[in-house]
Amino acid sequence: MSRRLVNLTLDTLEDLPRRCRRCVFWELDPVAAERANEAGDPALEKEAWVSATLLEWGSCGKLVYVDGMPAGYVMFAPPAYAPRSSAFPTSPVSPDAVLLMTAHVVEAFSGGGLGRMLVQGVARDLTKRGVKAIEAFGDAQPNETSHCVAPADFFLSVGFKTVRPHARFPRLRLELRTALSWKSDVEYALEKLLGSMSPEGLFRPAVRSLSRSSDSVGVGA
């Protein structure tokens, strides 16, 4: 079984789950997102956002492939690039942190450590860029309609700590020095599965996210 982590680009964007590919929950403010959905082509807005963010800021997502199949992804950016973040009751994101907007692992590949692999990939990337921490808004009460906000339990399971509690949308934080010091079960499993292939090599360019897909859902207090 081979696992490959890659950066999100305009080419790999097409490998996001269809619902996520057309979702602009994070990329636009609530009013603009509603207009884009009413216009019927939010995928174009998504592509424009990815293009602009790549040009202005750099890598803003990772996908993971298992045996060549898209298995998960994460998206991240400074909060200024994610207008929806200001609508959360536990905002704002700390000034020294990048926002992990959403994460999703395809159900068929869940439980295999891909979520942690994705987060570690983001941590390695951002550390090289001088970022100190990642923050995220988690959903403490996930349901069938909350596709755009990853479960709070997921973030807690991969090392995040709650920095601002909330009954529904706590804000969580991961110090990057903590993320990079993990002796993770994922690396051990990869070593066993892939023999001589170094886990370090695997954490370079290929990922796909965890959490849930993306749909247009609102954020309440």
Image (cartoon, rainbow, N blue to C red):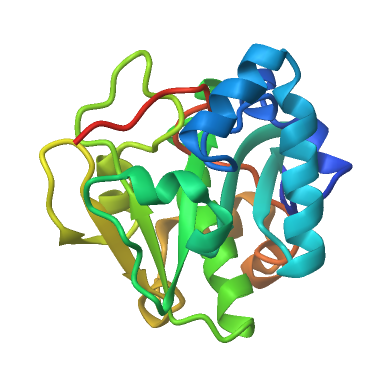
Eyeballing the image, is 74 above or below 161? above
- The residue drawn where x is 50% and y is 57% is 119
The quadrant of the picture occupied by the C terminus is top left
Residue 24, horizontal then vertical, whole percent? 60, 33
**Could you say which is closer to the camera, residue 2 or residue 182?**
182
Left or right: residue 62 versus residue 166 is right
Q: Is residue 97 visible?
A: yes
Q: Is residue 196 visible?
A: no
The extreme right residue here reads 11
- The residue drawn where x is 41% and y is 57% is 185
Name which quarter of the figure residue 65 lies in.
Answer: top right
Q: How many badges with numbers are in the image?
A: 0
Left or right: residue 88 versus residue 128 is left
**Could you say which is closer to the camera, residue 23 or residue 133?**
23
**Could you say which is closer to the camera, residue 213 or residue 5?**
213
Residue 163, horizontal then vertical, whole percent? 19, 64
Eyeballing the image, is 177 above or below 197? below
- The residue drawn where x is 63% and y is 66% is 199
The quadrant of the picture occupied by the N terminus is top right
Name which quarter of the figure residue 69 lies in.
Answer: top right
Residue 6, horizontal then vertical, whole percent? 75, 54
- The residue drawn where x is 23% and y is 42% is 169
Residue 180, horizontal then vertical, whole percent? 46, 77
